Each structure stands twice: as C-alpha cells, then as structure tokens.
C-alpha cells in the first residue's frame, strides 16, 4: 500500500517563528507536516554578515524544537544536509521543490513572506509542483497590507505622521478619549538631544544572551561554511527564542526606555547601542508581537507615572513601533517590485570598499561600520545620517547600497530594509514618502557626536586639504540639485545659504567635490 500523502504542508519561513503563525491555524498534527528550510542560497544571495546568518539558523532550530515539543511533526532541512548537497540543492526554492515532490502534499500553506522575491519563488514552486498554495495574512502586523493600501487611496502624499495618528486612534494607543495623551502627538522638542559634552555617562547595558548548545553549534557551522563572509561572531548574544525576546523587552522597559527619547539621535565613539531597545531582531523574527511591545510600554508608563517614565520617551518609542515600523512595511508592498530598481538621481558609482571593512579615515564612519562588523547593529541615526547619507552624497548606485544593508544588519529583512534605504536614506524613489532628502553637513554629525574630535577632517571646512567629505559633498549636492531643492519649502533655506557663496567659492567647491568623488576609496 502506498503511504498516505500529507494533507497540508505548512512552510514556516525563517522570520515567521511564532506559534500563532496563521499558516499553522487549522492544521492537524496527525495529518499535516511543518517544514522549515535552511538554504545556503539565502545566506549568499547578498554577502551576509556571519551574525545575521547565525541568528536566523539558531532561531529556526530553537523554533523547530519548540514545535516538536508541542507535538508537531516537523521536517527541518538543515543547511549542510548531505543529501541536499549531493543533489546540488543550494537555494531555498530547490529545496522546497524537492520536498513538494517527495511529500506530494494536497495543499501548501504559508504566511505572507517578508520579501517580494520569496513570495514569487514560493508561488512558482507550488505552481510547478501542481500543489494548491494558500497564503495567510501576516497577523504579526497591526496594519495589514490591504489596510495600508486602502489608507494610501486618494492620498497625494504618504506621510508617516498622518498614518501614525490614524494608527493611534484605531488601536487606542496613548489616547485620552479622542485626544492624544499629554495633549500632543509628538514630543520631539524634548527628544533628539546630543549627549552632554562630557559624554553619555553610564548607560545600563542591553540584555544579551549567552549562546546555548544549539547556538554554539550554529556558530561553528557558520564559521566553517561562511568563513569569508563579513563580520564577527565573537560577541553574538542576540535573542533566539520567544522567552529571550520577552526578557529583552522587559529589560529594555525597566532599564533603558527612560533614556530612549532624549538620546535616540545621539552618537558617541564606542557606544554602539546607546539607549536603544535592540528589539528589532525579536520583532522581525516574530518572536515577540508589536502589540505586546506597545502594551507593555504603555502599561509601564501608567504604572510608573510620567515622572519616572516620561511621556516623551514612551511616545518616542511607540512612534517607532506603531508608526514607522508598520508604515515602512506598508510602503514596501505598495512600492514593490519597482523600489528595487529605483534610482531617482541616476547615481552609478560603486560602493567604496571600506563599507565592508570600516577602514576609512572618516572617524564617524569608521566607528559606525566598525560596530556593525562586530555586532551586526547600528542605530537609526548611524544608518540614516552616516552610512546612508554618505552613500547618497557620494552618488553611489542604490542597488549595491541596499544589498550592503540587507547583508550587514542582523535585523535586515527586505520589507524593512529596502524602503529605509532606497526611500528614506537615498531618496531613490524620488520622495514617495519623505518630504525631502535627508542631507546635512559634517557639522550636524559634529553636533550629535564626538566623532569629529578624533578625525583627520574638519566638519566646518568644505574645501581645502582637511575638508570634511560630508561637508564638501553636502554643499556639492545643494549645488547640483539647486533648482529642485529651492522649489521645496523644506530645503529652500539650505539653497539660500548656498546662494551666498561667491562664484569663486562655488568653483572651488566643485573642484573639491570632483576630487573627493574620484577618490572615495581613499577617504
Ligand atoms: P530602536 O531605536 O530601539 O527602535 C524601536 C523599534 O522601532 C525598532 O526595533 C524597530 O522595530 C522600529 N523602528 C524604528 N525605526 C524604524 C524604521 N525606520 N523602520 C522600521 N522600523 C523602525 N530596521 C530593521 O528592522 N531592519 C533593517 O534592515 C533596517 N534597515 C535600515 C536601513 C536604514 C538606511 C535606516 C535609516 C533604517 C533602517 N532600519 C531597519 C530602521 C531602524 O534603523 C532599525 O529598526 C533600528 O535601528 C533597530 O534598532 P533598535 O531595535 O535598537 O531600534
Ligand atoms: Fe565624520 Fe567629517 Fe566629523 Fe570626520 S569631520 S568625523 S568625516 S563628520
């Protein structure tokens, strides 16, 4: 007698590691199977940081174990599986096709993917194997793709602030009847400070998790299989289970949330985490749900009171999770697949080699890239105003920039990485959801950090041997896009400053910028 075929095959992707995964709902462990696939092709589609690879593998293995403990029949195809290797199956779609052929399931169930490409390859695999595919809406987000699409309808501009207020009202977050709690939607005036001149002082360290046996095995595997990949595993301490994700959340609320608001934009040498939450990893792998994050933060504010936990920090943090995170995901699905090729300014330069090594004389970038290689982490302003802004000012082709971000950050998944890079940092989509390009001279970096004190360049100088490359290229950017920037109310003032330069000063600026752009690898 032939084996009864599997009824449902539930494919769980590496960033969908939660028991309430909607693809599991309605499944029956006696008839159905759960499939997790580790594929080397996912690690070298972009040249991934070792810690990013290890994080996904370890979290997937922990999740498989949890499913098995709860009685689910799990098929977990391991990265170095001998049969897969012998058959030359390197990519996820090849491994999935082989499973579909072997198991002949009546249906394939999957929660919406976090990447447009993956969605396409899964659809192609199912169709080729003749297996009906059922997509399940990803209930890990508070705003579904369809809800976001409705929100965009009839809107000329997509602005996070409008979306965020709508989300606050809809989900009753930080609301006092119909008004925002504290009488304002935004407390930016209390936030976004630099550290004191003497430095940040003592900051309670973030929760870090000692690798257990499963993680240690994965770390060895990654060192062996991806020896030439960038980044280090020496400091690997990311949460890889739901329990650890919840511990990280509790620790952040108890110890670090208080400093988040005022110092979320501040930078300082050798201060890789500042007061940030480091929760993107647990959130993006779906170990913890954004709703429970928001509820826990709101509850802490209620319990501690506004003196002990000021609303400015609480609102500043919730804005990131309920506002930016949900907004960015909506934008991604609205703009794909075109966003991947967006290049509004037609920039064509290759990514400087030091993005992969941190070996540059620019102290700010050396620090940000150095910590990125060590931890797979940099905070928002480092990503936006250092590595991102430099790539924009230096006219780097957006595609290799996006690939770099996708490869190098442990929390990088395309739905969140690409709109932040192509849309927010590079303005490659021509400003679909930002009102202006995010550009500033080296003096902004000087104000927000102590990096310039140890740098061979001078932030106030736009020309001359010690001119700061940010400053030179910032002024050159204004010069190059003068007409468009003058027509935008939010950048018109910058252009008026440019227009104060004499013709000779403009000439010198252009010559300096041309020289800087010619020598990007040597900066
Ligand atoms: P915190 O500063 O503590 O913020 C709290 C949470 O808010 C984060 O965990 C995150 O879930 C959410 N959040 C904050 N800002 C954003 C934002 N702009 N978009 C989406 N969510 C946000 N975030 C990623 O998760 N993955 C990425 O690959 C990624 N790439 C980025 C690339 C660029 C160029 C820029 C400018 C930003 C990028 N971000 C990305 C957004 C943000 O920088 C990170 O979410 C944040 O630095 C993660 O650290 P944290 O958890 O300590 O965040
Ligand atoms: Fe960065 Fe310029 Fe300051 Fe050097 S002088 S640290 S390059 S901003």
Image (tube, helix red, strand yellow):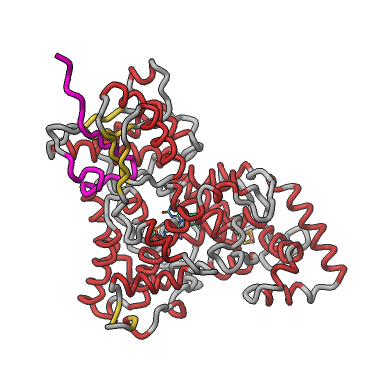
Main secondary-structure element of the magenta-colored stretch: loop
Residue drawn where x is 42% and y is 73% of the image? 262
**Magenta run includes residue 505:** no
**Magenta run includes residue 22:** yes
Quadrant of the image occupied by residue 325 = bottom left
Quadrant of the image occupied by residue 215 = top left
**View quadrant of ligand 1:** bottom left
Q: Position of residue 348 (x, y in %)?
A: 69, 46
Q: Is residue 364 visible?
A: no
Residue 334 vs 359, above or below: the answer is below
Q: Is residue 422 visible?
A: yes
Residue drawn where x is 37% and y is 54% of the image? 280
Residue 14 vs 362, above or below: the answer is above
Quadrant of the image occupied by residue 65 = top left
Report whether 251 appears left or right of 162. left
Report whether 136 appears left or right of 274. left
**How many circles with numbers are drawn on the protein?**
0
Which residues fall within the magenta stretch? Answer: 1-27
Residue 53 vs 482, above or below: the answer is above
- Residue closest to the eye, 66 or 268: 66
Q: Residue furthest bottom?
A: 183
- Residue closest to the eye, 31 or 153: 153
- Residue closest to the eye, 297 or 199: 297
Q: Position of residue 144 (x, y in %)?
A: 35, 58
Q: Position of residue 300 (x, y in %)?
A: 23, 71
Q: Position of residue 99 (x, y in %)?
A: 31, 25
Residue drawn where x is 25% and y is 33% of the image? 9
In the picture, the quarter occupied by the N terminus is top left
Q: Residue furthest right?
A: 504
């Amino acid at each position: 007698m032939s084996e009864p075929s599997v009824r449902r095959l539930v494919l769980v992707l590496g960033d969908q590691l939660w028991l309430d995964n909607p693809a599991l709902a309605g499944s029956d462990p006696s008839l159905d199977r759960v499939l997790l696939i580790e594929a080397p092709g996912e690690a070298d589609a972009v040249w991934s940081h070792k810690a990013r690879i290890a994080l996904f593998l370890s979290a997937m293995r922990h999740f498989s174990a949890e499913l098995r403990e709860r009685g689910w029949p799990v098929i977990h195809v391991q990265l170095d599986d001998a049969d897969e290797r012998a058959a030359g199956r390197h990519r996820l779609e090849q491994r999935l096709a082989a499973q579909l052929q072997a198991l002949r399931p009546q249906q394939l169930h999957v929660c919406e993917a976090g990447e447009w490409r993956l969605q396409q390859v899964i659809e192609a695999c199912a169709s080729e194997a003749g297996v009906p595919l059922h997509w399940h809406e990803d209930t890990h987000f508070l705003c579904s793709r369809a809800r976001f699409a409705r929100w965009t309808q009839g809107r000329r501009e997509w602005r996070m602030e409008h979306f965020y207020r709508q989300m606050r009202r809809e989900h009753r977050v930080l609301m006092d009847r119909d008004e925002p709690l504290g009488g304002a939607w935004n407390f930016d005036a209390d936030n976004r400070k630099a550290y004191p001149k003497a430095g940040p002082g003592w900051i309670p360290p973030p929760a870090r998790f000692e690798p257990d046996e499963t993680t240690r095995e994965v770390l060895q595997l990654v060192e062996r299989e991806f020896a030439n990949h960038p980044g280090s595993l020496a400091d690997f301490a990311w949460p890889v289970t739901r329990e650890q994700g919840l511990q990280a959340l509790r620790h952040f609320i108890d110890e670090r949330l208080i400093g988040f608001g005022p110092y979320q934009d501040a930078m300082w040498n050798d201060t890789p985490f500042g007061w940030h939450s480091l929760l993107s990893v647990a959130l993006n792998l779906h170990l913890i749900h954004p709703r429970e994050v928001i509820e826990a933060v709101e509850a802490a504010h209620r319990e501690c009171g506004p003196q002990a936990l000021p609303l400015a920090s609480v609102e500043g943090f919730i804005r990131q999770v309920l506002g930016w995170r949900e907004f960015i995901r909506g934008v991604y699905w609205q703009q794909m697949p075109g966003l991947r090729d967006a290049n509004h300014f037609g920039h064509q330069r290759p990514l400087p080699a030091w993005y992969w090594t941190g070996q540059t004389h620019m102290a700010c970038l050396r620090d940000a890239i150095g910590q990125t290689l060590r931890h797979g982490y940099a905070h928002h302003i480092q990503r936006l105003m250092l590595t991102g802004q430099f790539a924009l000012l230096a006219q780097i082709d957006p595609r290799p920039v996006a690939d770099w971000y996708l490869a190098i950050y442990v929390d990088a998944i395309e739905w969140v990485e690409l709109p932040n890079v192509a849309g927010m940092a590079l303005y490659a989509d021509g400003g679909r959801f930002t009102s202006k390009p995010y550009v500033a001279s080296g003096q902004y970096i000087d104000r927000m950090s102590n990096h310039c004190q140890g740098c061979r360049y001078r932030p106030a100088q736009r020309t001359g041997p010690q001119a700061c490359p940010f400053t030179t290229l910032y002024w050159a950017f204004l010069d190059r896009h003068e007409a468009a920037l003058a027509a935008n109310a939010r950048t018109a003032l910058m252009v008026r400053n440019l227009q104060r330069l004499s013709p000779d000063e403009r000439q010198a600026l252009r010559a300096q910028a041309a020289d800087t752009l010619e020598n990007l690898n040597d900066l």
